[in-house]
Image (cartoon, rainbow, N blue to C red):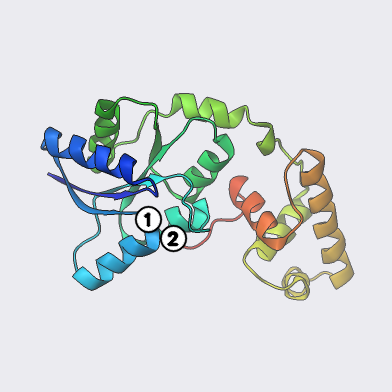
């Protein structure tokens, strides 16, 4: 029997999934809550093992990011199935990059959701052809055509290093590193991808496989 945790800020969704798991008899819901923090808090307080599968809403109402939520759960030892509406290809790609095992639409029948839980609990990959197609066709992820040097600068900058430290690490002048980051921002903006802040750049680097955080 698979141990399942449900994280969604809509109680009605959680109650429906709990009832479906109870009817199915192959899953036991060990946690149900509205935030990843509450799940991790339950884990720490109870001393119980991580759930086999965490069914996670793509966007929660507590201000957390998709990457933060997925990466935290995966690092804690559970597999993640994203349970989401079908119009968020950008956030879906972010979730998959962060380590989610797959996605199942909230418009899917409950039996399909249960099948997804079973598949992931058995260590198998979900068939996400529909989602992959939507993500690949999303203009937000158009190729920014970064040069090798620009990718190197972005990779180090995305780890949190100050730009001067990035320059020192690469053996280039600070002005050169600064110019590279400026060009990276311009290139992402030119293809419709936000790059105004350091957090934006970190997300762009993750999405394009330039940088992967620890545990993701």
Frontmost of labels 1 and 2 is 1
* Quarter assignment of residue 173: bottom right
Q: Which mark is residue 11?
A: none
Q: How many marks?
A: 2
The spot of residue 201 in percent (x, y) is 69, 56
Cβ atoms at labels 1 and 2 below 8 Å apart:
yes
Neighbours of disc 1 within 10 Å: few (<14), some (14-19), many (20+): many
**Tag 2: Cα neighbours inside 10 Å, few (<14), some, or many (≥20)?**
some
Measuring 87% from the left and 65% from the top, which residue is drawn there? Answer: 176
Judging from the image, what secondary structure is the residue with disc 2 in? loop
Residue at the spot x=52%, y=60% of the render?
A: 213
Q: Residue at x 72, y 73 (%)?
A: 162
Q: The N terminus appears in which quarter of the rendering? A: top left
Task: Point out residue 133 in the picture as x, y percentages from the top left corner.
Answer: 54, 25
State the image coordinates of residue 69 (x, y, percent, origin top left). 44, 56
Report how far apart the C-alphas of labels 1 and 2 lie in the structure.
7 Å
Q: Quadrant of residue 152?
A: bottom right
Q: Is residue 108 above or below residue 175?
A: above
Looking at the picture, tell me which residue is in the foreground, 128 or 83.
Answer: 83
Which of 155/66 is in front? 66
**Residue occupied by mark 1:** 74
User: Is residue 216 visible in the rendered structure shown here?
Assistant: no
Please, is residue 163 above or below residue 185 in the view? below
Q: Is residue 34 visible?
A: yes
Q: Is 79 in front, or is 153?
A: 79
In this rendering, would 19 be left or right of 100?
left
The local secondary structure at tag 1 comes to helix
Farthest residue to the front: give it: 12
Which of the numbered marks, if any, corresponds to residue 215? 2
Q: In the picture provided, is 171 more to the left or to the right than 12? A: right
């Amino acid at each position: 029997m698979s141990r399942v945790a449900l994280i969604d800020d809509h109680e009605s969704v959680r109650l429906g999934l709990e009832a479906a798991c109870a009817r199915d008899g192959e899953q036991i819901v060990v946690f149900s809550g509205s935030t990843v923090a509450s799940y991790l808090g339950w884990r720490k307080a109870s001393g119980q093992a991580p759930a086999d599968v965490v069914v996670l809403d793509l966007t929660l109402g507590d201000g957390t990011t998709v990457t933060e939520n997925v990466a935290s759960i995966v690092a804690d030892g559970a597999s993640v199935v994203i349970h989401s509406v079908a119009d968020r290809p950008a956030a879906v790609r972010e979730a998959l990059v962060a380590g989610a095992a797959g996605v199942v639409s909230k418009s899917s029948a409950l039996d399909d959701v249960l099948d997804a839980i079973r598949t992931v609990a058995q260590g198998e990959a979900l068939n996400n052809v529909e989602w992959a197609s939507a993500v690949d066709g999303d203009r937000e992820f158009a190729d920014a055509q970064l040069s090798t040097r620009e990718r190197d600068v972005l990779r180090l900058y995305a780890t949190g290093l100050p730009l001067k430290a990035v320059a020192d690490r690469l053996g280039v002048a600070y002005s050169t590193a600064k110019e590279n980051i400026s060009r990276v921002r311009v290139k992402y903006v030119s293809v419709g991808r936000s790059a105004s802040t350091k957090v934006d750049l970190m997300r762009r680097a993750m999405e394009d496989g330039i940088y992967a955080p620890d545990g993701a």
